[in-house]
Amino acid sequence: METILKSDNKEATVSFDAPFTIIGEKINPTGRKKLAAALKTGDYDYVRNLATKQVEAGADILDVNVGVPGIDEVAVLPEVAKLVSELVEVPLCLDSANHKAIAAALAVLPGRPLVNSVNGEEKSLEAVLPVVKEYGVAVIGLTMDDEGIPNDAETRIAIADKILERAGKLGIPADDVIIDPLVLTVGADSNAGAVTLQTIRLLKEQFGVNINLGASNVSFGLPDRHTINQAFLSLAMGIGATCAITDPIKLTSTIRATDLLMGRDNFGARYINYWRATQPMEDA
Ligand code: THG
């Protein structure tokens, strides 16, 4: 199973047989006051800086989310996505609950962006999937519906099945649907990590689809979040996750190490090159 995303001159392939795909999460104003203010005032240098930094840190794709209360996403998402696409070469992931904003951004972007996201709710399936089909792009399907995020793996699998079936009926192949099994925090329910890992295992066994994680949620409310995030990402990769929306500045080294341990890095070249590129400069 391969999901291929494109910018105007670069491709990213998401597959279990390829190195893990890193989707940079930082262009997202949730919990980031500076970015929220920058988006509201149109100070796009701040956004440009987040884009370049993440690509330098190893992002293969950049997530773009402009969801600030009071902002007109239908106008701002295409504007911000376009300027990011003109600055960096990587494909984009359009992150919005507003399908009109997603359609407006798809209309102005080159290549083959990833739509983030559709879920199992009837109104989401009906609004988002036709747009994905119209533009011939790929989509992330969240395993939640109008009853929320199920507590067990089996119900999440049933929602994934429904999303894949509905996409298929419209002519969207399973290659173009990346399932996101969702992660709740182990700070509130110590079984939450295990449920998500079990969901990943079943998704891989039953559908063989690509699997995304928004990995940093898992540690919310606990001390030393980074240690938990690193451990969780490695476990998720080992069991079948193929991409993550995460912070490349903090997590690329863990991902390179895990790819090497999984036999997805010949001669450790990617691991070593990343280490080299991130060493402080010697005195000139
Ligand atoms: N699945 C899918 N899409 C998603 C998510 C997911 N999109 C949104 C989110 N979850 C992933 N993106 C983020 C972006 C930022 C943060 C977490 C997830 C984050 N922000 C810090 C905070 O809120 O405290 C601020 C961090 C900083 O300043 O660097 O942690 O699960 N498909």
Image (cartoon, helix red, strand yellow):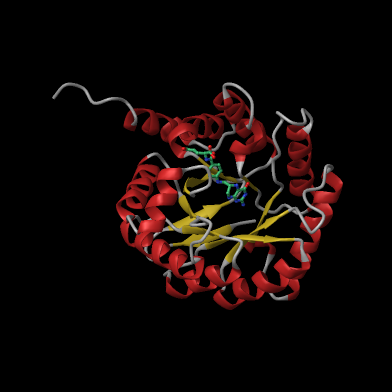
For the point 60% across and 69% down, the residue is 99
Furthest-front residue in view? Answer: 70
Q: Nearer the viewer, residue 2 or 188?
A: 188
For the point 33% across and 49% down, the residue is 46
Q: Nearer the viewer, residue 41 or 203?
A: 41
- x and y percentages locating residue 158 in the rendered image: 84, 55
Task: Please indicate whether residue 212 sits to the left or right of residue 281 in the image.
Answer: right
Mark yes or no: residue 11 visible. Answer: yes
Q: Would you identify the image quadrant in which residue 284 lies?
A: top left
- x and y percentages locating residue 180 in the rendered image: 68, 50
User: In the rendered picture of this protein, how many numbered marks are placed on residues?
Assistant: 0
Q: Quadrant of the N terminus?
A: bottom right
Q: Would you identify the image quadrant in which residue 201 lies?
A: top right
Mark yes or no: residue 267 visible. Answer: no
- x and y percentages locating residue 262 in the rendered image: 59, 33
For the point 80% across and 57% down, the residue is 159
For the point 73% across and 43% down, the residue is 200
Q: Nearer the viewer, residue 196 or 277?
A: 196
Q: Would you identify the image quadrant in which residue 122 lies?
A: bottom right
Furthest-bottom residue in view? Answer: 134
Q: Quadrant of ligand 1?
A: top right
Furthest-left residue in view? Answer: 284
Task: Please indicate whether residue 48 sits to the left or right of residue 253 in the image.
Answer: left
Task: Please say if 118 is above or below 170.
Answer: above
- x and y percentages locating residue 193 in the rendered image: 73, 33
